[in-house]
């Protein structure tokens, strides 16, 4: 199986189900490092990271979501809310 964004995000969810929070956070960090600069999925990553207390990951994911086309006021306000 290829190491894709979807696999990393789904893997993080699976790790959380197994009670492996640190492994899940590691997969989210890897997604930040290897994933695209923008995109819709960053909203989900932001929520997941916030839920497990990974504030730095959550903020960066929120920034990437806000920068995703189309850039809208709602996206920018969501990012400001995270800050």
Image: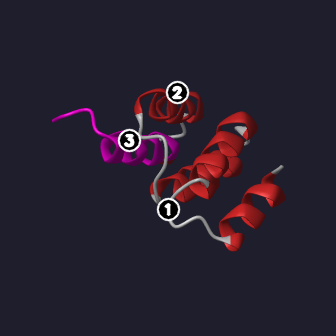
Q: Earlier in the sequence, mark 1 or mark 3?
A: 3
Q: Residue at x 26, y 32 (%)?
A: 3
Whether 20 is drawn above or below 6: the answer is above
Residue 41 place in picture, x, y as percent: 46, 56
Q: Residue at x 58, y 35 (%)?
A: 21
Q: Earlier in the sequence, mark 1 or mark 2?
A: 2
Camera-side residue: 24 or 45?
A: 45
Q: CA distance from mark 3 to mark 2?
A: 10 Å
Residue 17 lies left or right of residue 6; in this view the side is: right
Q: Residue at x 42, y 45 (%)?
A: 9
Q: CA distance from mark 1 to mark 2?
A: 27 Å
Res 6 label: none
Res 69 label: 1
Q: Secondary structure at mark 3?
A: helix
* Tags 1 and 3 touching, CB below 8 Å: no
Whether 50 is drawn above or below 20: the answer is below
Res 26 label: 2
Res 11 label: 3
* Tags 1 and 2 touching, CB below 8 Å: no
**Could you classify mark 1 by the number of other residues whose Cα lies within 10 Å: few (under 14), some (14-19), or many (20 or more)?**
few
Residue 3 among magenta residues: yes
Residue 57 place in picture, x, y as percent: 65, 37
Camera-side residue: 68 or 13?
A: 68
| Camera-side mark, 1 or 2 | 1
Q: CA distance from mark 1 to mark 3?
A: 26 Å
* Tags 3 and 2 touching, CB below 8 Å: no
Q: Which residues are magenta?
A: 1-16
Q: Main secondary structure of the magenta part?
A: helix
Residue 13 among magenta residues: yes
Q: Residue at x 84, y 49 (%)?
A: 83
């Amino acid at each position: 199986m290829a190491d894709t964004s979807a696999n990393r995000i789904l893997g993080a969810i699976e790790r959380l189900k197994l009670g492996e929070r640190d492994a899940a956070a590691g997969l989210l960090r890897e997604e930040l490092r290897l994933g695209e600069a923008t995109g819709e999925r960053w909203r989900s990553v932001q929520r997941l990271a916030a839920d497990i207390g990974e504030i730095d990951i959550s903020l960066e994911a929120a920034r990437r979501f806000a920068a995703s086309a189309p850039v809208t006021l709602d996206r920018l306000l969501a990012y400001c809310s995270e800050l």
